[in-house]
Amino acid sequence: MTNYETVVEKDLPNKTLHVVREFKGTVERVWAAWTQAQLLDQWWAPRPWKAVTQSMDFKGGGVWLYYMQGPEGEPHYCRVDFAEIDPGKSFRAASNFCDENGNITAGMPTMYWHNVFSATETGSKVDVKLSFDDQASLEQILQMGFEGGFKMGLSNLDELLAS
């Protein structure tokens, strides 16, 4: 029996989070949902928040600039700098909080993402390894509610894949 729950392993001494999630969609559909702005905007933010892409250039050296809009309409900007991309299989990126022009906010943590996509017997799996510059940055992201928010977003992706 397949478990479509998000599994999060925290390794504070090594400054990492490991997130694994299986989906009932093909690797191609899940990859598209992670790499195309019009699809990301439909699932990325935990409800009642919503993600709004300002610009996205999904390629090595490209940037995704977006904001999460809160229930009161307040925007919280983020930028994702894409590094290595192996189409349909994996990508690496660094994400930061920023202003509306993409200028990184000083004093906030950088999250380094390594996402690997693979087929399973019932769909696909995304294996996400997140690393941080120091343990304090990892703890700060956790205190900000990253784990719960990311789990909600991944559940939103389930809904998108089912439609």
Image (tube, helix red, strand yellow):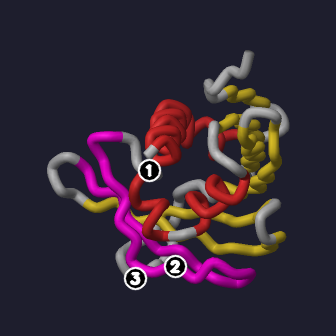
List x then y, in percent, for residue 114.
Answer: 77, 55
Badge number at residue 93: none
Relative horizontal placement of residue 135, taking residue 163 as reference (left or right): right
Viewer-proximal residue among 43 and 108? 43
Q: Which residue is mark 2?
A: 56
Nearer-N-terminus badge (3/2):
2
**Residue at x 81%, y 34% (from the top left corner):** 121
Whether residue 160 appears in this view of the structure is yes
Q: Callout 1, which amino acid?
A: Trp
Q: Callout 2, which amino acid?
A: Met
Nearer-N-terminus badge (2/1):
1
Kindly indicate the quadrant of the structure image that contains residue 101: bottom left
Badge number at residue 101: 3
Q: Is residue 1 above or below residue 10?
A: above
Q: Is residue 4 above or below residue 59?
A: above
**Residue at x 62%, y 56% (from the top left corner):** 29
Between marks 3 and 2 in the image, the one whose residue lies nearer the viewer:
2
Q: Which residue is mark 1?
A: 43
Q: Is residue 56 magenta?
A: yes
Q: Callout 3, which amino acid?
A: Asn
